Amino acid sequence: MSVVIIGAGQAGLSVAYYLQTLNLAAGRDFVLFDRSPHAGGAWQHRWESLRLGDAHRVNDLPFLSDLGLRFDTADRQRPARDVVSEYYAAYEEHFALAVVRPVTVTGVTECAGDLIVATSSPVFGERTTATRVLVNATGTWGAPFIPHASGAETFLGRQIHTSGYTSAEDFAGLNVVVVGGGTSAIGFMLELEGAADTLSWATRRPIGWVDSEHLDLEEAVAAVAMQDTAARAGQALPSIVSGTGVPLTARLRSARDRGLLVPRAMFTSIEPTGVRWPDGSFSPADAIIWASGFRPELRHLAPLKLRAKAGGYAVAAGASVADPRIFFAGYGPQASTIGANRAGRLIARQVVAQLAAQP
Ligand code: FAD
C-alpha cells in the first residue's frame, strides 16, 4: 500500500478526500483504518446530552455541501454524536472512502524501508500492512488525561473522566466535584445543577472569562499559534482553553451570578469521603468528574521512537520533523474541525510529493 491513514475522524476523512482529488484511490493506493464501530470519529462516543447547539462549532467536512448537508442548518437540539455520525457516514459513502473498521492499529514498526502497520480486529483478526507513507489521525479521545492528585486512590466514591460521562442522572442526589476549566467542565456544571445534591467546581488555573458571546477569533488565532509553536519545537501541547479563555455568554453569566459557575482553586488532596481545599476546609464528595482534557493518542507509534527530547512530537505543517514519511493530521494547531479540514489539504499534497520523492 502507498499510504495508510489511521483514524476516520474529521482529520482522517479530510486527508482521504484530498488524496482522492490527487488521483489516489481508496483500496488501491490508500487504506483508512478505524478502531470505532461506526462512522463519526470521536463524536460517536460523546454523551447524549451534548447537543449540536452546545458544541463550539462543528465545521463541515470538505465539500460536505455536495451531499446537501451542512452542520449550520442541522437541528441544533439533536445530540451532536448522532448528527456527526450520520453526516460522516453519508460522506464516506458518497466519496467512496472505504473505511475499514473496526480495526485497531496496535503498533507501527520499520522493516527494510517500509513502515509496517500491525492491526487487530474482531472481524479481520491480526494482520500487518506494509506502507510507504503513514498518516496518523487518531485524535485524543482514547488518551484521557487525569492529573495526579494526592489521595486519589483512597477515594471511596466514583471517579470518572469526561470520556466516561453519560448523563446527569448518574449523579442524581450525589455530592459532586467537577474538575477542569474548559467547556466540558462548564457543561457538566450546568447539567448537574438540577440533579446533584451539592456541586463544587475546582480548576487548576483561574478561569480566563472573556467578555463575549462567542470565541474571539483573534484569541483563537493566538491559541492556534501557541499550539503550532509547541508542535514545531517538539514540546508537549498547551491546552487550547489556556489560549482562548472562556466566552462569558449570557447563559454563563447568569450561572455565575447565581453562584453556580464560581470555581475554587484546585483541592490539595482527596480523602476517602471527599476533598480537602487549600484553606483546610473539607467538602464531602460521592463523585469526582475529571474534565481535565486529553492528550494526543500516539501509543502505537512508540516503536518508531519519534518523540523529541522536549517531550512531544516535532510536527511542522502536519509533517513529522523526524521522519518525512509520517504525517500527523489533526495534531496541535489542527485539533479542531476546521483545523482538521486544513490538515487534509495540506497533508495530502505533501503525501503525494513524498511518494514521488521515494525511490
Ligand atoms: P477524532 O474525531 O478523535 O478521530 C480519531 C479516530 O481515530 C477515531 O475514530 C478513533 O476510533 C480512531 N483511532 C484512534 N486510535 C486508533 C488506533 N490505534 N487504531 C485505529 N483507529 C484509531 N472541535 C470543534 O471544532 N468544535 C467543537 O465543538 C468541538 N467540541 C469538542 C468537544 C469535546 C468534548 C472534545 C473532546 C473535543 C471537541 N472538539 C471540537 C475537538 C474535536 O475533537 C476535533 O475538532 C475533531 O473532531 C477531532 O477530529 P480528529 O479526526 O482529529 O479526531
Image (spheres, rainbow, N blue to C red):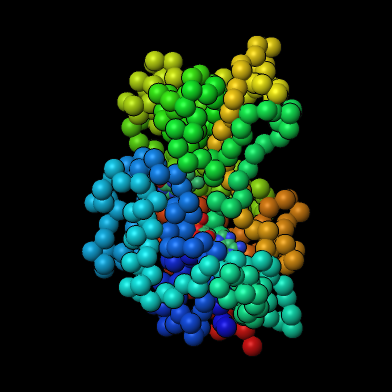
Of residues 215 and 90, the one nearer the viewer is 90
Q: Looking at the rendering, in which quadrant would you find the C terminus?
A: bottom right
User: In this picture, is 53 found above or below 6?
Assistant: above
Image coordinates for residue 255, horizontal then vertical, percent: 39, 21
Which of the two residues, 263 or 169, is positioned nearer the viewer here? 169
Residue drawn at x 38%, y 26% is 252
Q: For this rendering, which residue is in front, 75 or 114? A: 75
| Residue 166 appearing in the image | yes
Q: How many marks?
A: 0
The percent coordinates of residue 244 (x first, y second) are 47, 37
- In the image, residue 286 lies at what x, y percent? 59, 25
Image: 238 above or below 275: below
Tell me the residue at 57%/83% (across/down): 1
Q: Position of residue 26 (x, y in %)?
A: 46, 80
In the displayed structure, 323 sits above or below 277; it is: below
Check the image and name the residue furthest to the bottom. 359
Residue 145, picture quadrant: top right
Residue 245 is at least partly visible in this image: no
Residue in front for this viewpoint, 33 or 219: 33
At a point 66% along the width and 48% down the height, the residue shown is 236
48 sits to left or right of 273 = left
Q: Is residue 319 left or right of residue 254?
A: right
Tell me the residue at 48%/19% (across/down): 197
